Amino acid sequence: MPVDRKSLDSFLKNFAGVDSYGKEENSFAKRISTYIEGQKWVRRPLVMSPAICSQFGWVCKNSNLLECETCGAKLCIPEPKIELYDAYKACIEKILENLKASHKAHCPWPITPAPECLVKMISMPKEESLRHFLKRLKPSLEFQSHFPHIKDGILSLLGLEKQHVVALCKLADIDVDDANKFGESAVSLSCTGWTLKTQGNGAKILISCDSCQRLIWSKAFNLISNEDIPVSQNDKDSSIADDSPSRKVKRLKKEDFNPFEEHRPWCLWIATEEDRQSFTCKENSTNSKSTKETNNVPGWKIFIKSLLGNVDEHQESELENTPSKEQIRGVRDLLETWANIA
């Protein structure tokens, strides 16, 4: 059966060339943005998140209408009512089926959806995880005074210890003084998908996640820089007349940054496989205990497990290059022997 040439040409136009994955990643991000703009896609269950809909080529036109960016098919998606659970479940299952089935004939999306790695975190080689880690961390160093304080206990939750932070900073060529100053914040952010960046005229420094496209003004949080210390009680009276933006920011109640809570609920950094599964899969009692445990692993934990492989390798390399006590003793004995001969 012949392929619909118009749909196929439109589909391939975005992905031609050696940098096809980069183009596909950008195209996926553009589709995601249509759900976020104007908060058109809110109060929807995670099984039909913007990422899952975008994986099959759909863009959001309004709160109840999707359109395929390739074949132009329309898909009406009413908001399911949770009051009647059986009807709610059946409605969602039908919507998930239609994400694949409602394209026009021969549209490529049903058989060639966007890669799974754009929707969920997939275990990767340690070299690849390090590349992604540095890709987020390096640009952030330009705005080091805007690194937020990380909420107490986050480093422990991430499974990171001080030596891990030090080793990862070394891999990023961050010197010891800077590592002591903002290393924990920088590593925690990059390990959970966040980057510091500017947007537009660069007036604001934003904490950004490329996966869920969350953008937050860095000054909404306590910063590690001394220049952003909140106004004390003694200074409040003298600062009332000063309505400059910087004073207004300082008068706001600020908190330390929680890298988990600031992601959108469906973001691959925090959503689990169970979150993305259909109701049928969730209620399948044949799933083993180990499978259920695996399905409850968030994306950041998968990423950090891979990333720490580079730390182990780095530490082993340092140990190999560090002379043992026996080697040092042997060199000392040799030098003493030469001295006696002289």
Image: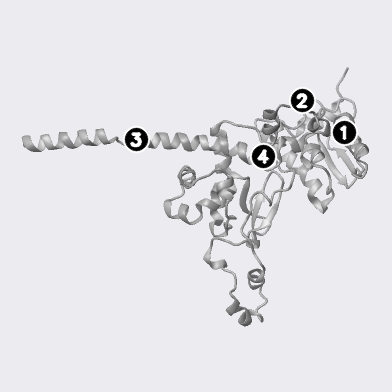
- On residue 298, the disc is 4
Residue at mark 3: 321
**Upstream in the sequence, badge 1 or badge 4?**
1
**Upstream in the sequence, badge 2 or badge 3?**
2
State which mark lies toward you, 2 or 3: 2
In the rendered image, residue 58, in percent from the top left (x then y), is placed at 83, 38
Residue at mark 1: 93
**Upstream in the sequence, badge 4 or badge 3?**
4
| Residue type at tag 1 | Glu
| Residue type at tag 4 | Pro
> Which image quadrant: the N terminus?
top right
Question: In the image shown, does 156 or 53 lie closer to the viewer?
Answer: 156
In-image side of 339 versus 222 (left or right)? left
Q: Confirm whether residue 136 shows in the render.
A: no
In-image side of 86 versus 245 (left or right)? right
**Upstream in the sequence, badge 3 or badge 1?**
1
| Distance in Å between CA atoms under marks 4 and 3 | 36 Å
| Distance in Å between CA atoms under marks 2 and 4 | 22 Å
State which mark lies toward you, 2 or 4: 2
Report helix, strand or loop for mark 1: helix
Question: In the image shown, does 140 or 313 lie closer to the viewer?
Answer: 313
- On residue 286, the disc is 2
